[in-house]
């Protein structure tokens, strides 16, 4: 996959974040690039355009418009895949950190996780937590 094409031993979250930012930058520049490339094909100056840049029957313009649309879709799909990978990495790290915290808490000797299960939690009072006497804010 990406490690072979990029020549990296591994891909870190930093690499993923940078590539996501690069895709976003390209997506932001795409409309300006489109205008810059279509303008010479229209044979008009920027003042004469008035919204007619995309009109006309030049097959080169139509092909270029299709390619720009495909590029925008590819960038959006790639950015979505990168986001999914980042979320997967963060979820894995969160699960691992939770397991480590549980091991550490069990070593404290004062907490048992059976006592903290939702079924054994005390029922909330009708007044709620704010009604405690002597609460200092």
Image (cartoon, rainbow, N blue to C red):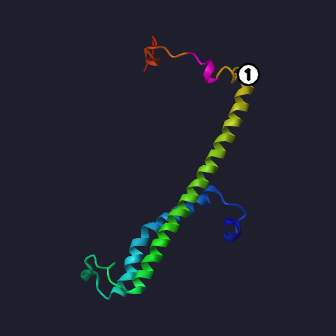
Give me the residue at 72% from left, 24% from top.
108
Apparent side of residue 3 relative to residue 121 in the rendered image (left or right): right
Residue 53 picture location, percent across and down: 32, 79
- Mark 1 neighbour density, 10 Å: few (under 14) some (14–19) many (20 or more): few
Furthest residue to the top? 133
Name the quarter where the C terminus is drawn: top left
The image quadrant that residue 113 belongs to is top right
Query: Which residue is drawn at the image coordinates 24% and 82% (left, top)?
Result: 48
Q: Which residues are magenta?
A: 117-122
Camera-side residue of 104 and 72: 72
* Depth order, front residue of 129/66: 66
Left/right of residue 118 with respect to residue 37 in the rendered view = right
Q: What's the residue at 60%, 58% (across, down)? A: 14
Q: Assess whether residue 118 is covered by the magenta stretch.
A: yes
Q: Is residue 57 magenta?
A: no
Label 1 sits on a secondary structure element that is loop
Q: Image quarter for residue 78?
A: bottom right
Q: Is residue 128 or residue 55 the one in the foreground?
A: 55
The residue that disc 1 covers is 109
For residue 24, above or below residue 128: below
Expressed as whole percent of the image width and height from the top left, the position of residue 102 reads 70, 31
Looking at the figure, which quarter contains the N terminus? bottom right
Q: Residue, x 64% and y 50% (percent of image)?
A: 89
Q: x, y percentage for residue 80?
A: 54, 58
């Amino acid at each position: 996959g990406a490690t072979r094409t990029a020549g990296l031993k591994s891909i870190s979250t930093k690499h993923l974040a940078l590539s996501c930012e690069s895709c976003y930058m390209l997506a932001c520049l795409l409309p300006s690039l489109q205008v810059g490339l279509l303008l010479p094909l229209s044979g008009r100056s920027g003042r004469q355009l008035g919204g007619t840049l995309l009109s006309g029957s030049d097959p080169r313009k139509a092909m270029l418009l299709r390619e720009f649309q495909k590029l925008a879709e590819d960038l959006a799909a790639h950015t979505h895949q990168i986001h999914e990978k980042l979320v997967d990495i963060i979820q894995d790290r969160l699960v691992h950190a939770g397991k480590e915290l549980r091991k550490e808490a069990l070593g404290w000797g004062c907490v048992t996780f059976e006592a903290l299960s939702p079924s054994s939690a005390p029922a909330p009072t009708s007044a709620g937590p704010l009604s405690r006497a002597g609460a200092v804010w």
